[in-house]
């Protein structure tokens, strides 16, 4: 690993395209793959998915919740899965959505960002709902150690709209304010800053101005939650610069056969259009 996260991400996307493939071991998927709902079934599921998917995409996003649900053995499987993905050349974005007062955020930061941590990720998702400033230490560590953060701004779930589109005294929506605060951290950094945001692929075009973000956008909601490649283009523009459409269940439902999983991830990746220079 060398260089800033934004630069590493830009290189990976130029090589493999922008798809972020999720590893979400839902109990229903384990059942559909004929696996037991225990740590052994979890391991078979996650490692099969990681080995088939990680070589094909720029970014893999394991969903921590589905591993944590199995206790310490599940967390051990998560660590193994992340290692397999990184060894296959993918960047690992751990979806953990952590957010707390600053001093506690420091402990979360230590758990996921430093080199050599058991759950070391290239980037993590974080929540700014204790105030963006509560993330200051995580921002500092990410920028200093070549890692990234994806800050929840306008999430893909329908319940989010009221809170995230509420107007602040400065006249901006909560989500826009989060995007602009992330953008301030990325100012002047090329080709892409390290502090990204999460913007659901399911939201209406025109809700947010991302023009000054200068950082990556994780866009979940593509696939199983209904958003299509056309929705992504309408929302983010045709070139999708810095945007990582994320899909989990829609790819994973094609397992357990590794060849079918590989074919599904390639189809999904190719549905986003040809690679463009500088994308
Ligand atoms: O706004 C958000 C933020 C995160 N997620 C996560 O992404 C995946 C989506 O899975 P699909 O199977 O592709 O629907 C999942 O891990 C969510 O926790 C999101 O959906 N929306």
Image: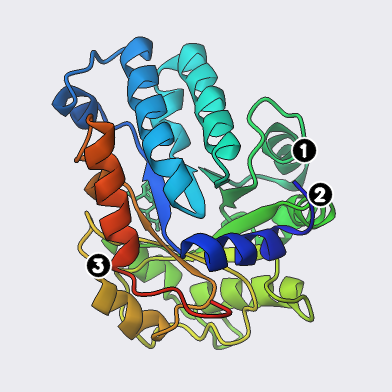
Residue 227 numbered tag: 3
Residue 68 on image: x %, y %: 46, 25
Q: Which mark is residue 145?
A: 2
- Which of 200 and 222 lies nearest the eye of the viewer? 222
Q: Are marks 1 and 2 in contact (CB under 8 Å)?
A: yes
Q: Is residue 262 left or right of residue 28?
A: right
In this view of the protein, can residue 252 be seen by the observer?
no
Decide which of tag 3 and tag 2 comes sooner along the chain: 2
Which of the 4 image quadrants contains residue 136? Answer: bottom right
Give residue 45's quadrant in the image. Answer: top left
User: Which residue is at a point 82% across and 55% down the rendered structure image?
Assistant: 140
Numbered disc 3: secondary structure:
loop
Q: Is mark 1 on a helix, strand or loop?
A: loop
Outermost residue on the right side: it is: 144
| Picture disc at residue 114 | 1
Q: Which colour scheme is used?
A: rainbow
For marks 1 and 2, the one nearer the N-term is 1
**Residue 192 x %, y %:** 67, 72
Q: In this view, does 228 lie above or below 55?
A: below
Calculate the distance from the C-alpha at mark 1 to the C-alpha at mark 2.
Answer: 7 Å
Badge 2 local density, few (<14 within 10 Å), some, or many (20+)?
some
Nearer the observer, 246 or 205 = 246
Is the CB–ligand 1 distance for label 1 below 8 Å? no
Distance from disc 3 to disc 2, alpha carbons, whole Å, reads: 34 Å
Mark 3 Cβ inside 8 Å of ligand 1: no
Specify whether 66 is left or right of 261. right
Does 239 sit left or right of 271 as displayed?
A: right
Task: Please identify the quarter of the rendering in which residue 204 is found.
Answer: bottom left
Q: Residue at x 72, y 29 (%)?
A: 117
Asked if the residues shown at circle 3 and circle 1 are in contact, with their CB atoms under 8 angstroms apart, the answer is no
Q: Position of residue 193 (x, y in %)?
A: 70, 70
- For disc 2, does the CB lie below 8 Å from ligand 1? no
């Amino acid at each position: 690993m060398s260089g800033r996260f934004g630069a590493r991400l830009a290189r990976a996307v130029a090589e493999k395209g922008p798809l972020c493939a999720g590893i979400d071991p839902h109990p229903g998927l384990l059942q559909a793959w004929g696996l037991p709902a225990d740590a052994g079934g979890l391991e078979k599921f996650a490692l099969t998915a990681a080995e088939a998917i990680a070589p094909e995409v720029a970014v893999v996003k394991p969903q921590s919740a589905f591993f944590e649900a199995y206790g310490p053995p599940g967390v051990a499987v998560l660590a193994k899965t992340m290692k397999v993905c990184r060894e296959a050349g993918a960047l690992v974005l751990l979806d953990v959505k952590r957010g707390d007062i600053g001093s506690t955020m420091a402990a979360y930061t230590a758990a996921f960002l430093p080199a050599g941590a058991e759950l070391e990720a290239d980037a993590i998702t974080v929540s700014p709902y204790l105030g963006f400033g509560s993330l200051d230490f995580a921002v500092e560590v990410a920028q200093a150690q070549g890692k990234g953060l994806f800050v929840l701004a306008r999430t893909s779930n329908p319940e989010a709209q009221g809170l995230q589109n509420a107007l602040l005294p400065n006249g901006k929506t909560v989500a826009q304010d989060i995007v602009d605060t992330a953008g301030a951290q990325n100012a002047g950094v090329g080709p892409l800053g390290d502090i990204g945001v999460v913007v659901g692929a399911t939201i209406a075009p025109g809700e947010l101005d991302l023009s000054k973000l200068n950082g990556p956008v994780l866009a979940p909601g593509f696939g199983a939650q209904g958003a299509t490649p056309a929705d992504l283009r309408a929302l983010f523009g045709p070139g999708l610069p810095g945007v990582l459409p994320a899909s989990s269940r829609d790819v994973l439902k094609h397992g357990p056969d590794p060849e079918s999983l590989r074919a599904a991830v390639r189809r999904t990746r190719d549905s986003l259009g040809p690679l463009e220079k500088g994308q």
